[in-house]
Amino acid sequence: MSRPEHIAPPEIFYGETEAVKYTENSRIAAIQAEMAYRALELLNLPEDEPAYILDIGCGSGLSGEILEEEGHIWVGMDIAPSMLDVAKDREVEGDLFLQDAGQGMAFRPGTFDGAIRYLKTKRFYGIWEIPWLCNADKQINNPKARIARFFSTLYSSLRRGARAVFQFYPENDDQIQMLTDTASKCGFEGGLLIDYPNSKKAKKYYLCLFAGQADGHKNRMPTALGEDGSEHPAVASVEFEKRRIKERRRTDKRRPVKDKKWIMHKKETVRARGDRAVVADSKYTGRKRKPRF
């Protein structure tokens, strides 16, 4: 399936129908929640203190609901009007505004305590800005210039020591290098973090960036999940079920052959119980059928 940033600009791809379909998909909602909790963990915000968070490409506000539940205040920006319309219909608590991240953000310096954006799944895609920033869907759009504008204005919008976390699926290594190099030139520290690097299904890429240092503390990259070889809980449960089915099949092969002796014993047992009618014995009982051609 083609990636949406290769099909049309986000404001066109996510029309009214696609925005509603995206929001009502239960699988998307579950993935949004999982990614939101992981992003909050990577932001490393002070405990029991509300933070002011920027949700870039907020869509219909699915991730914002998780931020609300965790006691944070959020502002959402998105380039797709239909997505924001759905968010307003859902009466989300965050402030919403229409904005193309490639044109930068005009917030006062040090406004936010953190910034997040995710998600992209195999089938449905969230309006995460970076893939479209890398895509020159208009003649006037220069991907490198748009990414530089995005990171430079984002850096200014964050308080010193704050983090920005982006979950994405890179198309190639060159794209990763371009993003990390541009973020570094704009003042960010940090880099790429990969959860469950040895898993094909659960592998997640995060761009974890630090907007300078706070109070002289050195920035340390968070620890990735699954580096010790452990699997994602959902994937582990699926693998366990597959192993259980295989073991059951092997057990089935070791069961006694249902020959005439087994059939006669089974029929005598049922007759003794007297709870069901049993077909009378004949010369055909237990006889193997000839193969049909």
Image (spheres, rainbow, N blue to C red):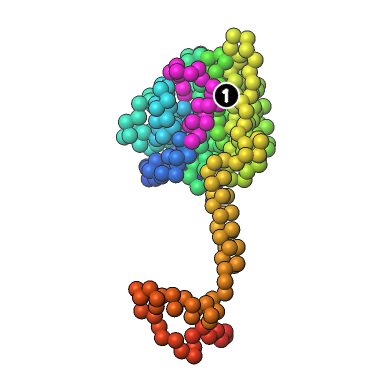
* Residue at point 63%, 24% (across, down): 221
Who is closer to the viewer here, 286 or 94?
286
Left/right placement of residue 1 relative to residue 33 reads right
The quarter holding residue 70 reads top left
Magenta segment: 34-54
Q: Is residue 82 above or below residue 69?
A: below
* Residue at point 35%, 29% (across, down): 92
Who is closer to the viewer here, 17 or 8?
17
Give amino acid for label 1. Phe
* Residue at point 46%, 27% (across, down): 55
Q: Secondary structure at mark 1?
A: helix
Q: Is residue 51 magenta?
A: yes
Specify whether residue 33 is in view. yes
Specify whether residue 179 is in view. no
Q: Where residue 63 sits: x, y (%)?
A: 44, 32
Please, which residue is most extreme toward the top here? Answer: 215
The quarter holding residue 224 reads top right
The quarter holding residue 13 reads top left
Please, which residue is most extreme toward the bottom here? Answer: 283
